[in-house]
Image: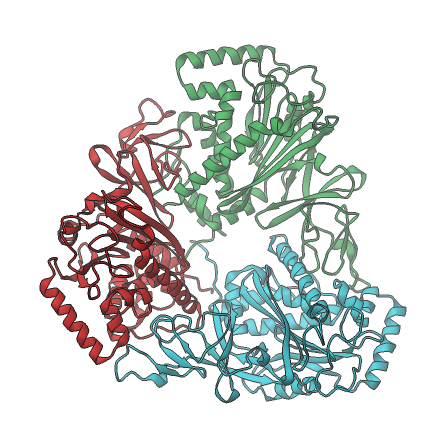
Chain colours: A red, B green, C cyan
Amino acid sequence: MTSARPDFADASSRAALARKRAAGHTLPRSFYVDPAVHGVDVERIFSRHWIIAGHVASIPRQGDYFLYDIGYESIVVARGENDAVHALANVCRHRGSRVCVEEYGHSRQFVCPLHGWAYDVDGRLQSAPNMPEDFDLSSHGLPTARIEVVDGVIFVCLDDGGDFSPVRRDILEYLAPYDLVDARIAYHRRYLCPANWKLVAEIFLELQTTGAAFAEMRQVMARAEAAAQRDGETTRRYAEFAAAWRATARLPHERPTRRGDAPAIDYACRREPIAPNFVTQSEDGRAVAPLLGSQSESDGGVTVIRLLAGWIVACSDYAAIVRFTPIEAQVTEMDVTWLVRSSAVEGANYDAARLSWLWRANVERTLKLASDNQLGVNARRYRSGPYAPDEAALDAWVTWYLGRFV
Amino acid sequence: MTSARPDFADASSRAALARKRAAGHTLPRSFYVDPAVHGVDVERIFSRHWIIAGHVASIPRQGDYFLYDIGYESIVVARGENDAVHALANVCRHRGSRVCVEEYGHSRQFVCPLHGWAYDVDGRLQSAPNMPEDFDLSSHGLPTARIEVVDGVIFVCLDDGGDFSPVRRDILEYLAPYDLVDARIAYHRRYLCPANWKLVAEIFLELQTTGAAFAEMRQVMARAEAAAQRDGETTRRYAEFAAAWRATARLPHERPTRRGDAPAIDYACRREPIAPNFVTQSEDGRAVAPLLGSQSESDGGVTVIRLLAGWIVACSDYAAIVRFTPIEAQVTEMDVTWLVRSSAVEGANYDAARLSWLWRANVERTLKLASDNQLGVNARRYRSGPYAPDEAALDAWVTWYLGRFV
Amino acid sequence: MTSARPDFADASSRAALARKRAAGHTLPRSFYVDPAVHGVDVERIFSRHWIIAGHVASIPRQGDYFLYDIGYESIVVARGENDAVHALANVCRHRGSRVCVEEYGHSRQFVCPLHGWAYDVDGRLQSAPNMPEDFDLSSHGLPTARIEVVDGVIFVCLDDGGDFSPVRRDILEYLAPYDLVDARIAYHRRYLCPANWKLVAEIFLELQTTGAAFAEMRQVMARAEAAAQRDGETTRRYAEFAAAWRATARLPHERPTRRGDAPAIDYACRREPIAPNFVTQSEDGRAVAPLLGSQSESDGGVTVIRLLAGWIVACSDYAAIVRFTPIEAQVTEMDVTWLVRSSAVEGANYDAARLSWLWRANVERTLKLASDNQLGVNARRYRSGPYAPDEAALDAWVTWYLGRFV
């Protein structure tokens, strides 16, 4: 009798794997290594939950679109009629070809390259050249996914997704002052990281707690430097600084992380001060672009919103959207988009290199750290280790993930 | 209890997969994506059926050979003694090394690089240096495969293959006027297409029906342009043109596709007119090489023979052999060889670029279309779609394939 | 009902596979092709047996280290306090990152890049910055492996490994005259060979028996040339030459291969003459470096020690350590280090190209032969073939391997 590798298609094999995780410890090896777990992650996590897809500034005109690929899945995010934004499955209903083959594009219709089946920018099938007279066009549109746009940020869900309105309300409260609807793309970078998406996300989550491994973050964020120093005096001084900032900051402060159960939406919103005299997250603390939205001056804080493995970071003068997406068990796409006020002119009002300095560094350091982490975890001698007290947020995130994995 | 991925080694699991295909629809996703299905395709389709391997003009002298690799299988097609052509397994009977390591070559013997076991050009073991005196050379020759040569075109079968004579008779009738025995290689191209071989073959099959996605084919073939236009007047004019051509064409016209059951040989022969005033399939319709064989002038038609996933196209002045071979589940080799009359001299009598224009374009477009098709099919949101009425030939081919897959 | 691919996690499936091997024949295809067999090889062969890791001359100072990766496993071989040499698992006990990310390096401590957990050069955890006060550092050191150093050559075992002292005694007897403790690295090469490690090892094993496929070996070794000629006269002359050499050689001659059962240690030591008038294994037979150790002149012989898939070759003036390591089912790392007397100066006393000529050639020929062997074995038409009488050592090695595989 032979044993066989489970593919985790049934709930009991998933539950058995999940039970192997000891409370307060990192995940067992399979979660970071096994292609079958990757399949479950794409199917049960990324295809059933809300995820951040991008920003409407990438698709300003009707017929503009971009592709968002998750593993083998491909979504067309398109600007349709009457300014609507749609999420469409990039699979022709005839023979299954991609209908959009460019990563970014503009098109009056989405025409399948194989036989010219033509879908309008809202995904409705308009013509199917060689089909019989009585062929029902209306039942062969591109499959659609749920989509929500909050202050220009695009959220999609490939499944039911439940009631998004409380999430929308929370996120909008945090983003409204920056008015990202009136933003333009300032810069964009994409990386492939040779590590499982959960290793990438765990390391990036720490930027909100300690971040001691991130030199640039310590230079910019008083909180990260205090966490790295770990002496009583530094900690006390940081607490005073943060309290003083909270007393005067004009924007909302911190909302407890929400992880709804029905439907499960894993998100968090928070604000915190940068460093003394820093008006934005820049190398020298000085502004790098015109103020966003209705602000008359910086209040010295930064807004951070996370939803699953996507982040929105907003400073007084720029915002960044960071999106981590599983491609293979050990390959994660890292996509970063920087936004500035739509009236800003490159060269005159901002410099892309200065603007992108911190979050490029953070993402590139995450890439290297996660790669080395993956190499270690791959070893059979890897054992789940204990989370430190200041890694409580990671512990909670991993626990939430397991609840959705099974 | 865990479930497990089937490997389709048993008939019942293959039958269960085949039953998932709805009549008249494209194949389910696994057929294009799953490495285990690829294994079955190599084992049950390509290793049990006749396939087109190439042309004798590639191996003019005794001891000339070329390798034909199908997935991990490797066949040595060699010119043996007395002008015989052999298909030999490229695996030494001692420790399993390849005995031929170059793709094309010439050799008096095939000598294993490991210990010098030497096989003659007919595959017989002639010496095995370190074996005992009583070692039986005669029972350790290279495994052979069946081989048939029809007008210079080489067909091989790695299994029994049954009676090839009716196929030979049909194909010879169509090829005889071109006398490809008296041909030389004019040009050769090889591509790797990142798509399953069945997606490649399905798209290429359409060149014989609509071909609307192939600009060069529409330019050259009146039938393709009529299929693309789809208006009554164009269709009527094409019907008149084709009827007039059939009334005068000197060569055989069309033989119903044969898909024998015992043994199963999937092939088809047909002739059709090119476009008005085109004497060959060239960009401007004018001749690109000396007339082939015994023809005194072009009759304005083209001959197309298909066997499994190989094509022979013959015009008045050149022929092309197109061979699609599965390498991995999502990788297909595309090999194209162009032939001209043996007395033709490059530069003086033909120009390889002009000669190869149409079928290079057709193959390269197929490569791109199949790649995009694969990317779409990879998505879990792919659903089998309905074949159009003018895709009836594909529907029949897929149905035949399934009958052999189980 | 579906069948499924076994993963060989249970003993009965391994035994069933092992039983498919016919006595006196090469291994069945799966052993060279299947990723699941590769997993077993890493787990049961390379992680449970003593293997040659390298030489202390690579890590002369305290804090020097090199990584030895086997499949996904990574071992830090480090020079610790008081000149001790350690084998440490390269996996942080916190979140599983690699603690050493460079292949070769020098470090006062091994500090995890993620959160700064710091291990001393003996692998003891010295600080874990963010853990609670009562966190037990002493129970979170890097996992260690057994390590033995014999005349500077480093042996490691990731499992219990049993009593190494008889092996040490044998090997030391053979190596002592060369005094490799007083050696320095003269040259180093690393290759990736696209073949299973067992195909690589089998081909390399033959260098000690026939070696007819190795032109340089035949040029240097009288025994190899005689084996290739295979005529009675040559064989007789070689026997006389070898007998005369044995009568005068000052070093130990040949120890029967040992393959202990509890624990299983697969090793062999032997000496043999080079060619008439050759003082070392060089292209012209002349010395290529100062004499090693206490020798006053060459005795015209070479010492060869093998342990699993590692070799130590020692001539009068240089030594080479050859190490084959499985990386994937069809990828093997080939690592070669050349040693000379520590006082030798490159340019003045030796030339790396001359010195490395024979074993570079042997390794590079092995790479090519094994690659072609793998391509042949991959074919379904591969059948296990009979070993020749002069391949008895391979037959025995394969039989030993199977006994440890199950």
Can you say whether B111 is above or below B122 in the image?
Answer: below
In terms of depth relative to the viewer, which is nearer, B50 or C228? C228
In terms of depth relative to the viewer, which is nearer, B43 or C178? C178
Q: Residue at x 44, y 71 (%)?
A: A380
Can you say whether A171 is above or below B255 in the image?
Answer: below
User: Which image quarter: residue A65?
Assistant: top left
Residue C233 visible here:
yes
Can you say whether A247 is above or below B111 in the image?
Answer: below
- Quarter of the image containing the C terminus of chain C? bottom right
Can you say whether C52 is above or below B206 in the image?
Answer: below
**In the displayed structure image, the side of residue A381 where residue B58 appears, left or right:** right
Spot occupied by residue A209 in the image (x, y as percentages of width and height): 24, 68
Spot occupied by residue B34 in the image (x, y as percentages of width and height): 45, 49
Spot occupied by residue A372 in the image (x, y as percentages of width and height): 41, 66
How many tags in the picture?
0
User: Which image quarter: residue B235?
Assistant: top left
**In the displayed structure image, the side of residue C160 where residue A288 appears, left or right:** left
**In the displayed structure image, the side of residue B42 where residue B176 appears, left or right:** right
Considering every residue shown, the one lying at the far front of the view is A348
User: Which image quarter: residue B251?
Assistant: top right
